[in-house]
Amino acid sequence: DIEFEVKYGLDGVAVAISSISCVDGEKGKLVYRGFEIEDLIQNSNFEETAYLIWFGSLPNENELDFLISMLSKKRELPNQIIEMMKLFPKNSHPMEVLRSVVSMLGMYSKKENSTFENAINLTAKIPTIIAYWYRIRNDLPLIKPKESLKHSENFLYMMFGKIPEHFNLFDKALILHEEQGMNASTFASTVTASTLSDIYSIITTAIGTLKGPLHGGANEKVLKMFDEIGSIENVEFYINNLIEKKEKIMGFGHRIYKTYDPRAKILKNWIKEIFINNNIKYFEIALKVEEIVVNKFKDKKIYPNVDFYSGILYNYFGIPKEFFTPIFAMARIVGWTAHAMEYCKNNRIFRPKAIYNGPKNLKYKEVKGVE
Ligand code: CMC
């Protein structure tokens, strides 16, 4: 039975040995290089966690300063690229812009740069691409990056010209998104890396894969769903209707987590805390959606994933929903590049097979043109 030989979606298939992160789907645990995610969000920040993911251990003060300074010096985009961005159609989705500009940056990179230098270069520039596109499409003057600001502070500053209250939660949300094992975009980019292609091609692949609504694109769709629901009274009708039509409910389910996604739990707790004083938008609707879906799908073990709650937090900072998935990319580039570099140490090109079930033994016959 050929169906047996095929692992659709590579479900349960291991394609690498990795020391970068451990995702325990039964216990709902996420560990980067031996450190539990709860510990990292409590005590670390984006740059330090990036160092940990890339190099395998926490940096000392000098090492961290060095990384921070490298990242902060590489933020600006080449002028020609900024000018080209101004010519892009204004309705282009930020993920389309990100995918295209990352690809273009490959043409502006120094050919002699190491893979790691290119990884730093892109990690530094992605927030600038996102913020510049936000300003360009809204006809706002560009805000240049400020070297003295940390990675996430600088991003919010380039978007809005100020650093909002609770900005540290934004930084911690980036930590949550930095790495997640062999997910679809990491796998796709590892495939590109395995052909010994360059880092710009690797990350362009990853961004294109993350964009899909079954992966990173889900965070935008979740907010769209909340908007369509509109009010708490409408939740039950709306969700039951989706279930009846057998449609996927965005922000729920996961290939690995068969319990609550630890990242969703963390985000939910932060939002709960802010909500007490600020009546944070969408939260009550979200809680009701969660209650109905978790109850309905108890047997299938479907729980909220990271994309269910992240958008509520980003919306609180004034970030429009089309920019949610780019923010995911801004963090996940760390995991993408770490996996690409790790895989290439013991590289073997990815070349799986498909089982042919088409026709055989046909004989060529010239198709006569119609007079
Ligand atoms: N809504 C309704 N039913 C669902 C959902 C959902 N969100 N997720 C899974 N199911 C059903 C699925 O149809 C299947 O039913 P059946 O056994 O009757 O065919 C059953 O649950 C088991 O599904 P699965 O095999 O665990 O799902 P999968 O591993 O193939 O897909 C997924 C994982 C994330 C693509 C899927 O859960 C989904 O489409 N979720 C909605 C999109 C989403 O939120 N994506 C974000 C994923 S997490 C962060 C990220 O990667 O960006």
Image: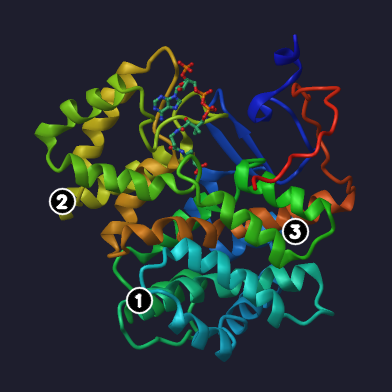
How far from the left and from the top, in percent, is residue 192?
Answer: 75, 53
Please identify, in this view, whether the residue under mark 1 or under mark 3 is nearer the observer.
1
In this picture, residue 207 sits left or right of residue 10: left
Please identify, in this view, whether the residue under mark 2 or under mark 1 is nearer the observer.
1
Residue 65 appears in the picture as rendered? no
Q: Count residues near mark 1 (Cα–Cα under 10 Å), then give few for <14, some for 14-19, many for 20+.
A: some
Three-letter residue code for mark 2: Asn
Would you say the residues marked 2 and 1 are in contact, meaning their CB atoms lie under 8 Å apart?
Answer: no
Please give the name of the residue rendered at 13% of the width and 33% of the height, measured from the top-left corner.
234
Residue 45's place in the image compared with 228, above or below, is: below
Residue 172's place in the image compared with 198, above or below, is: above
**How far is the residue under mark 1 from the one under mark 3?**
37 Å
Would you say the residues marked 2 and 3 are in contact, meaning their CB atoms lie under 8 Å apart?
Answer: no
Three-letter residue code for mark 3: Phe
How far from the left and from the top, in percent, is residue 108?
Answer: 69, 82
Q: Which residue is mark 3?
A: 55
Sequence order check: which comes first, mark 2 or mark 3? 3
Element carrying mark 2: loop
Q: Which residue is mark 2?
A: 279
Q: Which residue is mark 1?
A: 137
Please give the name of the residue rendered at 71% of the width and 63% of the height, measured from the top-left corner.
201
Element carrying mark 1: helix
Sequence order check: which comes first, mark 2 or mark 1? 1
Please give the name of the residue rendered at 48% of the width and 84% of the height, measured from the top-left corner.
145
Q: Is mark 2 within 8 Å of ligand 1?
A: no
